[in-house]
Image (cartoon, rainbow, N blue to C red):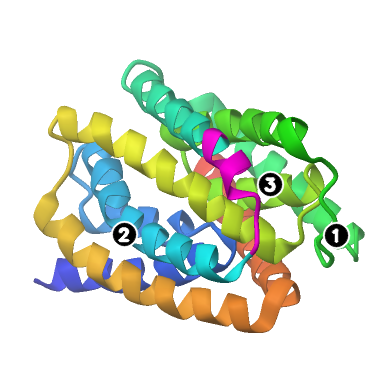
Amino acid sequence: MFDLLIVAAASLLAGFIDAVAGGGGLVLTPALFSTFPNAAPATLMGSNKAAAIWGTGWATVQYVRRVSLPWRRLLPAAVLAGAGSFTGAWVLTHVSPEGLRKALPLVLLAVFIYTLAKKDLGREHRPRFTGRTEALVAGVIALVVGFYDGFFGPGTGSFFVFLFVRVLGYDFLHASATAKLMNLLTNAFAISLFVSKGLVWWHVAGVMAVTNVIGSLAGTRLALKHGAGFVRGVFVTVVGALILKTAWDAFLR
């Protein structure tokens, strides 16, 4: 019972962080691995995604209602994100992500420094592309980050947000809204693989799903209320924390 309370609380905070700027895995994944140290990693990842998809789905609905985006052009990209995630999850069952684990802190550090250096980055919504070009560029981003999500995962939402801001020219609020749509599909496709292999603890995932939605509701409301500046601030904080956490896991633990 105490174990469930720990991961439920972690899922609540993860839902909040994910809804604003991505990176909820920073909280929930370590909580699951420390609470259930003897469980198979794939089972914990499957249970994680089976819970997180509910909060992501709720946040996506809220953003769709309030944020104007070219959803029809972004939906194909979301499908590609899902396909990439499924492929990455399949590769994970055959290949160790150890090399990527060591490179991740350096990639996140580059994102962190670039975001801080560009004071105006993501403060104004100025899309660089339109029509099929926007759909194509978004699709490439979605496929690559989706694969990463299925194969490894930490910081997926943050990578989506950063690339939509830097490459597509979105502000942080619109980028976060788009990232939710992508994450919804990456989770759904990865879950399909984990479920097919029986790698989900439904009793744990069910409890975490409830608190994840509650956290997502709070995060989405704050992001919509305070706009791009608030999302940028949370994004920088989350990426900074991700750098410390991933560097510790890769080089010090």
Circle 3: element type: helix
Name which of mark 2 and mark 3 comes first in the sequence. 2
Q: What residue do we see at 62% from left, 66% from top?
A: 67
Give, as a single range, the part of the protein colored magenta.
68-76
Residue 1 lies in the magenta stretch? no
Which part of the image, by quadrant, shows the N terminus? bottom left
Q: Up-down: is 30 above or below 67?
A: above
Q: Residues within 10 Å of mark 1 (few under 14, many from 20)?
A: some
Q: Up-down: is 243 above or below 241?
A: above
Instruction: Name the amino acid, label 2.
Output: Trp
Q: What residue do we see at 51% from left, 55% from top?
A: 180
Circle 1: element type: loop
Q: Which mark is residue 54?
A: 2
- Asked if one can make out residue 253 in the rendered structure from this viewpoint, the answer is no
**Residue 92 drawn at (x, y percent):** 37, 24
Q: Up-down: is 184 above or below 239?
A: above
Residue bearing mark 3:
108
How far apart, in angstroms, are the residues tagged by discs 3 and 1? 16 Å
Instruction: Name the amino acid, label 3.
Output: Leu
Name which of mark 2 and mark 1 comes first in the sequence. 2
Which secondary structure dominates the residues rendered in magenta? helix
